[in-house]
Image (cartoon, rainbow, N blue to C red):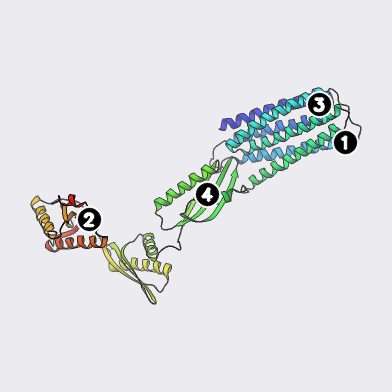
Amino acid sequence: MKNEKQHVALVSMLASGLLAIGKFTIGIFTGSIGLISEGIHSCSDFIATAVTWWAVRISDKPADDNHHYGHGKMESMAALFEVALLFGAAGWIAYEAIKRLMGEPHEIIAAPLVIAVLVISIVVDFFRVKALRRVAKKTGSPALEADALHFFSDMLASGVVLIGIVFVTFGFVKADAIAAIVVACFILSAAATLGKRSFDSLVDTAPAGTESKIASLLDNFPEVIAIERTRVRNAGPVLFIELTLAVSRSLPLERVSELKNQITQTLQQHLNNTEITLIAIPRSESSETIATRVRIIAANLDQAIHRLTILQLPNQLTISFDLELDAALSLKQSQGIVDNLETAIRAELGQHVEIDTHIEPIIANWLEGQDVPDNLKQEFEQALYSCTADRGDNKISHVRVRETSQGVIVYFDYYLPPDMCVDQVHTEVDRVERSIRSGFPHVFRVIGHAESLPLPQRQQIF
């Protein structure tokens, strides 16, 4: 892509040089002020395209320690240089044409030769404009787009001069000077358009319609609560977008990261050649329940809570929960953690909220152990089977008993009816666990895993 940009700029530069030489030579030989003005215009084209070729080569360099946004604005600088040349050329052409109109018209000879040169110029400009527009659209290059606009105006201007020459051949001798004035107007129009684009790019004017298009694309992401800030700027062919988005604070970090990637990919698909910086700010939603808000506050403080209960009294909101803390902490240290959590909850829900916190020790999550002897395992199996002997189709399976530094841990699978609700499942599993702990005081933990199988399969288990 980079080589293609440089190639089309180089070809355009060489074509401008050859056209300038041809127009000057024929214009001086025939005395056509219109064709000489076109020659001068083509000289400015040659200089402009040389600068464009140089700027394209520089702008293709990657970002470095001194140019964090790359070198893309060199293309806008080159386009601004073209504007200065265009204004200068247009002023000189208009001045000479007005002088010719006010005085004796200069005789023009060999009009057919002039016409031939102009036709060649129009054809060359047509193919240059086509090539430049194709590559400019493909790469998003403002310098090549400016060149395409420049040479499109050249093509139209040459057509106007051609019409003037035709009129001259039929005796209207001032038509050549009038055509030169029209050429000057075309150049001034192109220069004004190009100058505005270049200036807008250099002063970081946001491209028209880009912000609304971004907002429209973000409507497809319901997780985005609001667009808090949008900043868009061009640096050559690259569109830099900086977005600050408000997202639900209840989203997991993995989902936020995934969401940012999805938004980035969507914007890059619909906006060519972009570099996107996206910041996601967590925000609360009006739809959040009190339970969700409390859990988020605890999670943000890296605290684990469970058995959350919210009681709405006539004039009072009461919140209670179990808070898991390191078993080695002192009561004073624990109280500091509890105070911080309760303060954060009151800051969110109001200072008059009543909060009751029940602290529980966190059970060690990394232990070393081994399976108990088979005879001891069989004792636990028998005790478990006895607990469920009168429970119909309920069956115990896959009993494991391990010895650890904290004590014995018993694991078992408990197969229950598939239509049993969670509350009933918990009650039944908890009943079996309590029975084992009461029969074996040295047991550290009993962990029952509830499973559901169709009745024919359950009947085949112990």
Is residue 304 depicted above or below 136 in this figure? below
Instruction: Looking at the image, tell me whether mark 3 or mark 2 is earlier in sequence order.
Output: 3
Q: Which mark is residue 249?
A: none
The amino acid pointed to by label 1 is Lys
Q: Of the two numbered discs 3 and 4 on the same chain, state the one appearing first in sequence.
A: 3
Question: Label 2 is placed on what type of residue?
Answer: Ala
Which residue in the rendered view is the most extreme toward the right? Answer: 104
Q: Give neighbour class at mark 3: few <14, some 14-19, many 20+ (Cα, 10 Å).
A: many
Is label 4 in contact with label 1 (beta carbons under 8 Å)? no
- As measured in the structure, the alpha-carbon distance from the residue carrying label 2 to the one carrying label 1 is 101 Å
Q: Residues within 10 Å of mark 2 (few under 14, many from 20)?
A: some
In the foreground, 165 or 62: 165
Toward the bottom, the furthest residue is: 315
Which type of secondary structure does the marked residue at label 4 adopt? helix
Instruction: Name the residue at 54% across, 52% down.
Output: 215
Horizontally, residue 297 falls left or right of residue 226, namely: left
Residue indicated by mark 2? 450
